[in-house]
Amino acid sequence: MPREIKAAKIARAEAIEERMLAHYGEGECSLDYENDPFRLVCAVVLSAQCTDAAVNKVTPALFEKYPSCYDLAQAKLKDVEKIIHSLGFFRSKAANLVKLSQMLVSDFAGVVPNDLEELQKLPGVGRKTANVVMCEAFRNAQGIAVDTHVYRIAHRLRFAGPSADTPDKTEKALLSIYPQKDWLFINHQWVHFGREFCRAQRPRCADCIIGDLCPSFRGENQG
């Protein structure tokens, strides 16, 4: 198969986004956070390597006991661990929640920063988490959050080549073909799409809403 030129890839990406928007709308965050940027940061930190559904089971108790960063900054680590113990890596996550709360209080006057680089200074917050917060809490997209769904779909759609073997490289590839106006929606839309159609195991290619636009489904080589 001939290598897809950049203009054709951009046009295909635009067509895919049109269908995603028609099917999922702007997409909804699967984490419950009551429109509070602080609670969103905590929830996304907790979601690492576990499901959003599992996080949503523990956050009501967490935020009832610690409704703000000021409260969580003063929490005893063992108490936080007890609340979130059902999650994987709960000890390190509990430590990060307390430390990031303390940093929000000491360095940011208790306000979650609307800045991608500043967010990444918080313990437990990497680029993916920061991107989610920027898009979801502030609607100020500075990148695309690349989780396991987005990584898998980007490669199956051939928007990221074999050399884009990390989330950061995959994000860079996506940013080069999607306009910034679409960055707000891609993560949420693709998470839902990954759960409904483009599953890691037994993907529903025959029923896929973008099957005719997917080189993997059409059996095309990487390009």
Image (tube, rainbow, N blue to C red):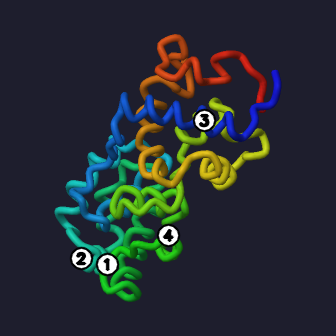
Q: Quadrant of residue 84?
A: bottom left
Task: Give the mark, 2 or 1, whose residue is nearer the N terminus.
Answer: 2
Q: Which mark is residue 116?
A: 4
At 80% from the left and 31% from the top, the residue drawn is 3
Q: Quadrant of residue 202?
A: top right
Q: Which residue is mark 1?
A: 111
**In the image shown, does 42 or 150 lie closer to the viewer?**
150
Q: Which residue is mark 3?
A: 11
Task: Give the mark, 4 or 1, whose residue is nearer the N terminus.
Answer: 1
Alpha carbon distance from label 4 to label 1 = 14 Å
Residue 81 visible in the shown view? no
Left or right of 147 on screen, residue 168: right
Q: Indicate the amino acid at tag 4.
A: Leu
What crowding class fits label 4: few (fewer than 14 Cα within 10 Å), some (14-19), or many (20 or more)?
many
Q: Which residue is mark 2?
A: 71
User: Which structural element holds mark 1?
Assistant: loop
CB atoms of marks 2 and 3 within 8 Å: no
Q: Between tags 2 and 3, which lies in front?
A: 3
Alpha carbon distance from label 2 to label 3 = 49 Å
Q: Indicate the amino acid at tag 2.
A: Asp
Left or right of 129 on screen, residue 72: left
Task: Give the mark, 2 or 4, whose residue is nearer the N terminus.
Answer: 2
User: Which structural element holds mark 3?
Assistant: helix
Residue 209: image location, x then y, percent? 47, 21
